[in-house]
Image (cartoon, coloured by chain):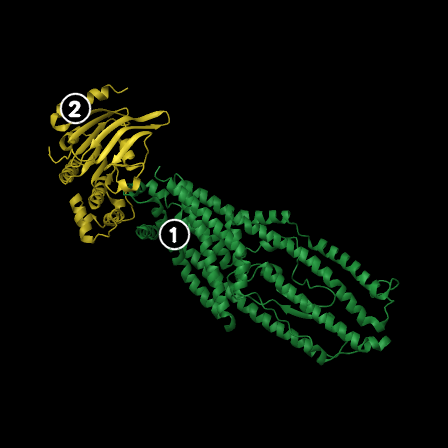
Chain colours: A yellow, B green
C-alpha cells in the first residue's frame, strides 16, 4: 500500500451523517466517510445498498435529506459548480456521443472541463494513457465496445486533471487485462495525490487497489476497514457475513 | 463553452441528416414561394400601373358630355403593390385592390367590407411568410426536440453535469446551435429575398423596402426565437425524445394551425361585424333618411322624395350636390363602425399572440409588409376622398354651368378642359417607420412571448440535474 495519504489535510471527499430518502424508502442512513488526498476508498455492497446514491450525492445529482456532502471542504449542495471543478466521474457505463469519434468526444468533454482546446497530439496521448489504441481514436463511438468507451471516459478524467475521482463500478464488464490496466491507472492517480472513491462488487479489486474499504448494507456503512490490515480471505468472509445478514 | 456546445450540437445535427433533410425542404419551399410571389408581384404591378394610366387616359379622352354621365362612368383606382407583398401578400388576395369611383356610393367593388366569410384572417395562402409562420416552427421542432432528451437518454447529460457545465450555459449552447442552424438556412433566403425586393422595387422606394425587409427579418427572428425557447423547454421537461416530439407536434398543430382560426372566430364573436347584407341594408336605410332630411331642408317639406318629379331642372345640379354631401357623414360613420370592428378583432388577435405567437407574427408581418388591413383602409379612405372630390367638382360644375339653363339643363356638355380638373389618383402608403409604429403592439407581444418561452426554458433547464 502506498503511504502518500495526507490525513492532516481537509478530506477531499467527505460525507457527514448523510441520509437520503426517496419517499418512504431510506436509501442512505446517516452515512459518514472521508477520503483524503492520495487515498482510494472502495465501497462494497450488494445492489441497492446505497453506493450509487452516495456517488450521486457527491455529484450533486441528488440532495441529501439530511447531513452534508463536501468536496474539498465545500458543501456540494451549496456550491455545486465549484465542487465539480475538483472531481471527475467515471460511471459503470461511460456515455458518449455515438455520432462522434472517440477523439472528438474526448476533445469536447476535455474542452468543457478545462476550458482549453487540446491538440490532436495531446488528445491521442491521453487516449493512449487510458489504453485506447490510436487506430480506434477516429472511429465513431457508436462502434465501440464497453471497454473502449470506458477508456475514453478515463481519458476525459485524465484530461480534467481532477483532485478527486468518483467511480461507479468502473471495472464492471471490463476484461481482466483492461481491469488490470485500469487498476494501474488508479494507482498512478493515487500516487499523484488524487482522492478516489469507487464503488465495486469486485472484492479482489477493492483489496488490490484500495487503502480503505467500506461495506454498505441497506443504506448504512456497516464497516470501514483499512485494506492493509485485511487478507483477501478476511475481507471475503466479512463481506459474505454482512450480505447474509441483509434483510 | 457555449460556442463549443453549439458546435457539437451542430455537428450532430449535420451528421444525423436532420439539418440537411429538413432544412433543404424548407429552403426550397421558401425560394419557390418567393419566386411565385415575385412573379405575381411583377405582373400585378405592371398591370395596375398600365390599367391606372389607361383608365385615366380614357377619362381625359371621353367626348363632350353631361358631367353627371361622366360621374357614372367614373374612374378606377388601383392599390399600389407593396414591395414586400412578394413575401407576405397579407389580406390583399381577399379584399381586392381596385376601387370604382362613381357617383353616389362609396365604392365596394372587389372590397367587401361586411363579407361574412372568415375575411381578414383567412389569408393562409402559399407565400414565404406562410412558410415561415407555419413551417418555421416545425423546422425548429425537428431540429431541437431532443436537445436535452437525447443527452438524458444517452447518458451524456450526467457526464456534462459532472464536468461542472452550468446548465444555463448548456441551454445557451443549444439555443445557439439551433439559432445558427436556422440562420444558416434563412440567410441565403434573406439574400435572395433582398435581391428580389430591390429588383422589384422602383429606385426611390428601395431604401424603404430594404428597411422593411430588415424589420421583417427581426420579427421572424423573434418569432422563431420563441419556438427555440419553447422547444428547449419541452425537451428539458420531457422524459424522452418521443414524449418531447409528441408534445411539440401537438403544440405546433395547436399554435400554428388550430388556434389562429379559433381565435379569429372568437374575436368575431367578441367584436361582431355585420354581414354584407345587413351592412348594406342599414347603410341604405340611414342614407335614405339622411338624404330626405337634407332634401326637405333645402327644397321644403313638399319637395317629395329626392330626385322625384318635383325637382326643378334649374336646381338639378344643386340637388345633386346636396344629395351627395348629405351622405358623406353617414357613409363615414357606417364604414368607420365596420372597420373599427375589424380593427378591434385584429387587436384582440394580436394580444392573443402572447399565447399563440403565430397570430402576433402574422399581424407584425402584414403591417411591416404594408399588406395589412390598416393599409387597405387607408387606401379605401383615400379612394373615397378622391371620389368625393370628383363628385363635388362635377356638382359644382353643374351648378355653375347647367342649372341656369333651366329646362335645358341636360343640354350642357363638359369637355376635356373640365375632365382635366379631375386629377389622377395618387396614394402614398405609410412608410417603413409608420408601419413599424403600427406594428409596435404585435412586436411587443412577440417580445412578451419570447420572454415567457425563455423563462420556461430556463426553468426546465434548471431541473435537469434532478
Q: In terms of depth relative to the viewer, which is nearer, B6 or A71?
A: A71
Please give the residue where the numbered disc 2 appears in the rendered image. A236
Dot 1 falls on a residue whose secondary structure is helix
State left or right for residue B322 relative to residue A24. right
Residue at 16 percent across and 46 percent down: it is A128
Q: Is residue B206 visible?
A: yes
Q: Residues within 10 Å of mark 2 (few under 14, many from 20)?
A: some
Subunit of mark 2? A
Q: Is residue B114 visible?
A: no
Chain letter of mark 1 equals: B
- Checking the image for residue B178, the label placed there is 1
Q: In the structure shown, which secondary structural element does the residue marked by tag 2 occupy?
A: helix
- Counting other residues with Cα less than 10 Å from the Cα at mark 1, is it few (<14), some (14-19), or many (20 or more)? many
Q: Quadrant of residue B335?
A: bottom right
Q: Please state the horizontal and vertical placement of residue B341, each as a whole percent of the image.
A: 64, 53
- The answer to whether residue A194 is above or below residue B300 is above
User: From the viewer's perspective, is residue B273 above or below residue A21?
Assistant: below
Q: Is residue B408 above or below residue B275?
A: below
Amino acid at each position: 500500500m502506498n503511504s502518500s495519504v495526507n490525513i492532516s489535510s481537509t478530506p477531499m471527499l467527505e460525507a457527514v451523517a448523510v441520509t437520503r430518502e426517496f419517499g418512504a424508502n431510506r436509501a442512505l442512513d446517516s452515512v459518514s466517510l472521508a477520503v483524503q488526498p492520495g487515498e482510494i476508498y472502495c465501497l462494497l455492497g450488494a445492489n441497492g445498498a446505497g453506493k450509487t446514491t452516495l456517488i450521486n450525492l457527491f455529484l450533486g445529482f441528488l440532495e441529501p435529506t439530511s447531513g452534508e456532502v463536501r468536496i474539498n471542504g465545500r458543501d456540494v449542495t451549496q456550491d455545486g459548480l465549484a465542487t465539480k471543478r475538483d472531481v471527475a466521474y467515471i460511471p459503470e457505463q461511460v456515455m458518449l456521443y455515438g455520432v462522434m469519434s472517440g477523439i472528438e468526444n474526448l476533445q469536447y468533454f476535455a474542452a468543457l472541463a478545462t476550458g482549453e482546446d487540446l491538440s490532436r497530439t495531446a488528445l491521442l496521448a491521453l487516449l493512449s494513457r487510458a489504453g485506447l489504441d490510436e487506430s480506434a481514436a477516429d472511429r465513431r463511438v457508436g462502434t465501440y465496445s464497453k471497454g473502449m468507451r470506458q477508456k475514453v471516459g478515463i481519458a476525459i478524467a485524465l484530461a480534467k486533471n481532477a483532485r478527486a475521482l468518483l467511480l461507479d463500478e468502473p471495472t464492471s464488464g471490463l476484461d481482466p487485462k483492461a481491469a488490470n490496466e485500469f487498476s494501474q491507472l488508479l494507482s498512478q492517480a493515487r500516487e499523484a495525490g488524487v482522492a478516489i472513491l469507487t464503488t465495486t462488487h469486485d472484492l479482489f479489486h477493492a483489496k488490490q487497489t484500495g487503502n480503505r474499504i467500506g461495506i454498505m448494507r441497506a443504506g448504512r456503512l456497516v464497516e470501514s476497514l483499512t485494506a492493509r490490515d485485511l487478507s483477501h480471505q478476511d475481507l471475503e468472509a466479512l463481506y459474505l457475513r454482512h450480505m447474509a445478514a441483509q434483510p | 463553452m457555449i460556442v463549443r456546445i453549439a458546435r457539437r450540437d451542430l455537428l450532430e445535427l449535420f451528421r444525423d441528416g436532420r439539418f440537411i433533410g429538413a432544412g433543404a425542404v424548407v429552403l426550397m419551399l421558401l425560394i419557390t414561394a418567393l419566386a411565385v410571389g415575385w412573379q405575381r408581384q411583377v405582373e400585378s404591378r405592371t398591370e395596375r400601373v398600365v390599367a391606372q394610366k389607361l383608365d385615366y387616359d380614357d377619362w381625359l379622352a371621353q367626348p363632350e358630355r353631361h358631367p353627371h354621365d361622366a360621374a357614372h362612368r367614373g374612374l378606377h383606382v388601383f392599390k399600389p403593390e407593396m414591395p414586400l407583398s412578394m413575401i407576405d401578400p397579407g389580406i390583399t388576395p381577399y379584399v381586392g385592390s381596385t376601387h370604382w369611383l362613381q357617383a353616389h356610393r362609396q365604392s365596394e367593388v372587389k372590397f367587401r367590407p361586411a363579407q361574412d366569410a372568415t375575411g381578414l384572417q383567412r389569408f393562409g395562402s402559399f407565400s414565404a411568410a406562410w412558410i415561415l409562420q407555419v413551417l418555421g416552427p416545425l423546422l425548429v421542432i425537428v431540429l431541437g426536440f431532443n436537445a436535452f432528451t437525447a443527452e438524458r437518454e444517452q447518458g451524456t447529460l450526467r457526464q456534462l453535469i459532472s464536468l461542472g457545465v452550468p446548465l444555463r450555459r448548456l441551454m445557451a449552447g443549444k439555443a445557439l446551435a439551433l439559432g445558427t442552424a436556422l440562420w444558416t438556412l434563412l440567410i441565403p433566403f434573406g439574400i435572395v429575398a433582398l435581391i428580389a425586393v430591390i429588383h422589384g422595387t422602383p429606385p426611390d422606394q428601395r431604401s424603404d423596402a430594404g428597411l422593411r425587409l430588415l424589420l421583417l427579418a427581426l420579427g421572424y427572428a423573434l418569432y422563431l426565437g420563441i419556438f427555440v425557447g419553447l422547444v428547449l423547454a419541452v425537451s428539458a421537461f420531457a422524459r424522452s425524445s418521443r414524449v418531447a416530439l409528441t408534445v411539440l407536434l401537438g403544440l405546433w398543430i395547436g399554435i400554428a394551425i388550430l388556434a389562429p382560426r379559433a381565435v379569429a372566430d372568437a374575436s368575431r364573436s367578441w367584436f361582431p361585424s355585420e354581414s354584407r347584407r345587413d351592412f348594406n341594408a342599414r347603410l341604405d336605410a340611414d342614407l335614405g333618411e339622411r338624404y330626405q332630411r337634407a332634401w326637405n331642408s333645402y327644397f321644403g317639406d313638399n319637395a317629395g322624395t329626392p330626385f322625384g318629379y318635383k325637382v326643378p331642372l334649374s336646381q338639378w345640379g344643386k340637388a345633386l350636390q346636396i344629395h351627395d354631401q348629405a351622405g358623406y357623414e353617414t357613409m363615414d360613420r357606417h364604414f368607420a363602425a365596420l372597420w373599427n370592428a375589424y380593427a378591434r378583432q385584429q387587436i384582440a388577435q394580436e394580444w392573443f399572440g402572447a399565447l399563440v405567437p403565430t397570430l402576433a407574427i402574422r399581424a407584425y408581418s402584414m403591417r411591416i409588409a404594408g399588406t395589412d388591413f390598416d393599409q387597405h383602409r387607408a387606401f379605401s379612405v383615400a379612394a373615397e376622398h378622391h371620389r368625393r372630390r370628383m363628385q363635388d367638382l362635377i356638382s359644382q360644375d353643374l351648378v355653375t354651368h347647367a342649372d341656369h339653363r333651366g329646362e335645358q339643363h341636360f343640354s350642357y356638355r363638359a369637355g376635356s378642359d373640365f375632365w382635366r380638373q379631375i386629377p389622377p389618383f395618387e396614394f402614398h402608403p405609410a412608410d417603413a417607420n409608420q408601419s413599424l409604429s403600427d406594428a409596435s403592439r404585435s412586436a411587443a407581444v412577440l417580445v412578451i412571448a419570447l420572454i415567457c418561452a425563455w423563462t420556461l426554458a430556463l426553468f426546465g433547464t434548471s431541473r435537469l440535474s434532478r
